[in-house]
Image: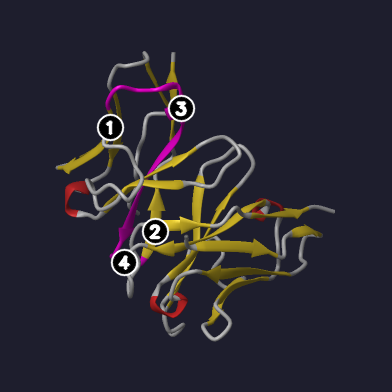
Amino acid sequence: SYVLTQPPSVSVAPGKTARITCEGNNIGSKNLHWYQQKSGQAPVLVIDYANDRPSGIPERFTGSNSGNTATLTISGAEAGDEADYYCQVWDSSTDHVLFGGGTKLTVL
Amino acid sequence: QEQLVESGGGLVKPGGSLRLSCAASRFTFRDYYMSWVRQAPGKGLEWVSYISSSGTIKYYADSVKGRFTISRDNAKNSLYLQMNSLRAEDTAVYYCARATIPARPSGMDVWGRGTTVTVSS
């Protein structure tokens, strides 16, 4: 079955750039979405279809998806960006939604 | 702003049943695929089920197939999840969510705050 692999944690200094990866076999061929989930809150879609930002999401959040790796890039990281981040695809071979295991972003 | 509000969670014994509801407002509910996603305590997101805009197409995660049933009432702007034969591992916060693209599964751009289901004797 298809698997999405994310690093458990990523740390970044304030003002620097954080990169969170999501790996999967030929993931570049799939529609890829990213969510931010702050502690005790519901997830928020931050990147849709690999690199589209929904309304209200800062331009600091960008995405890319190619080959076997998708990347969520957060430029100028802020304390308020501390959260868990999840990648997600629709696997058409199984008609299942798949989430990555999540990455905890720490801004320190 | 679009809104989803879940209800129906609670404490249930193993083997028991529960029905979750999700009330939608401020968007044309009947146009969108809808989903249930859950999160066990301290764990990541796990997709549970998706239903087409008309309710005729349904998808389920392997972990719930045969035990859970997703349904919707477009006249009432409501989504449901009937959960039977509940197990301890079904304990989680259950979120309903809207697909971003009308008429097919995709990313999910509107989420409720969740309702908590606890399965314990």
Q: Quadrant of residue A41?
A: top right
Residue B63's place in the image compared with A48, above or below, is below
Question: Residue beneath label 3, please?
Answer: A80
- Look at 78% across and 60% down and name the residue there: B14
For disc 2, the neighbor class at 10 Å (few under 14, some 14 to 19, many from 20) is: many
Where residue A94 appears, x then y in whole percent? 34, 65
CA gap between label 1 and label 2 equals 27 Å
Q: Which residue is mark 2?
A: A97
Both labels 1 and 2 in a single chain: yes
Q: Is residue A94 magenta?
A: yes
- Where residue A45 appears, as percent x and y from the top left, is 39, 48
| Rendered image: mark on residue B101 | 4
Mark closer to the observer (3, 4)? 3
Q: Secondary structure at mark 1?
A: loop
- The CA span between labels 3 and 4 is 28 Å
Q: Which mark is residue B16?
A: none
Cβ atoms at labels 1 and 2 below 8 Å apart? no
Is A88 situated above or below B57?
above
**Considering only order in the chain, which callout, 2 or 3, is on the residue closer to the N terminus?**
3
- The correct choice, above or below, for B68 with respect to A3 in the image is below
Q: Which label lies toward us, 1 or 2? A: 1
Identify the magenta region.
A75-95
How crowded pointer 3 is (Cα within 10 Å; few <14, some 14-19, many 20+) is rated as few
Proximity of marks 3 and 2: CB atoms separated by less than 8 Å: no
- Is disc 3 placed on a helix, strand or loop? helix
Q: Position of residue B115 (x, y in %)?
A: 66, 56
Structural distance between the alpha carbons of marks 1 and 4: 24 Å
- What is the distance, in whole Å, between disc 3 and disc 1 at their CAs? 12 Å
